[in-house]
Amino acid sequence: MTLPQLLGPSGSQEMHASSRPIAAVLIIGGAHYTQLKPDLKGMPILTILNRVPETDPVEEFIRHLSRKWAAFERQPLIPLGTTDLPKLRFRAVSADVKEAARR
């Protein structure tokens, strides 16, 4: 899904109305995770690209930032394609905290 598709017609118009179009949106979801392996939880870092001329350097910067973020978190960076995203099941970190407190 592209950024204009995600935002819809009015949002897409707003993106291009400014003097500099939005090249990408980066979402780092620290409040949720997906269980990738029994001993490995994955934190989603989603990139939504808007195919404008400015996208290529921004996309490379986001890749660089994602690698650095994973290293900072001491976790592997596991890139997934857009077709894999709907297959993942996310869980709120706060739900785990509440569940652990009940035990």
Image (spheres, rainbow, N blue to C red):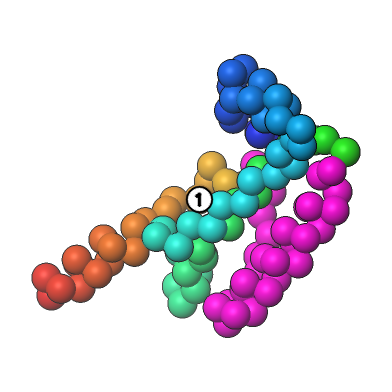
Q: Does residue 23 lie above or below 8 as drawn?
A: below
Residue 61, quarter of picture:
bottom right
The part of the chain drawn in magenta is 54-83
**Residue 102 location, quadrant:** bottom left
Q: Please state if 94 lies on the left or on the right of 85 as rendered.
A: left
Q: Nearer the viewer, residue 26 or 82?
A: 26
User: In the image shown, does 33 or 36 lie closer to the viewer?
Assistant: 33
Name the spot of residue 45 as percent of width and height, x first: 58, 57
Q: Number of labelled discs?
A: 1
- Does 64 appear above or below 55? below
- Left/right of residue 100 with respect to residue 27 in the rendered view: left
Nearest to the observer: residue 68 or residue 15: 15
Task: Give me the residue at 19% from left, 66% from top.
Answer: 98
Relative to 37, 93 lies left or right:
left
Task: Determine if residue 70 is in view.
Answer: yes
Which quadrant, please, contains the N terminus?
A: top right
Residue 38, above or below 35: below
Residue most toward the left? 102
Mark 1: amino acid: Leu
Q: Which residue is mark 1?
A: 88
The answer to whether residue 57 is magenta is yes
At 41% from the left and 58% from the top, the residue drawn is 32
Q: Residue furthest front?
A: 19
Q: Residue 42 location in percent, x, y?
A: 51, 65
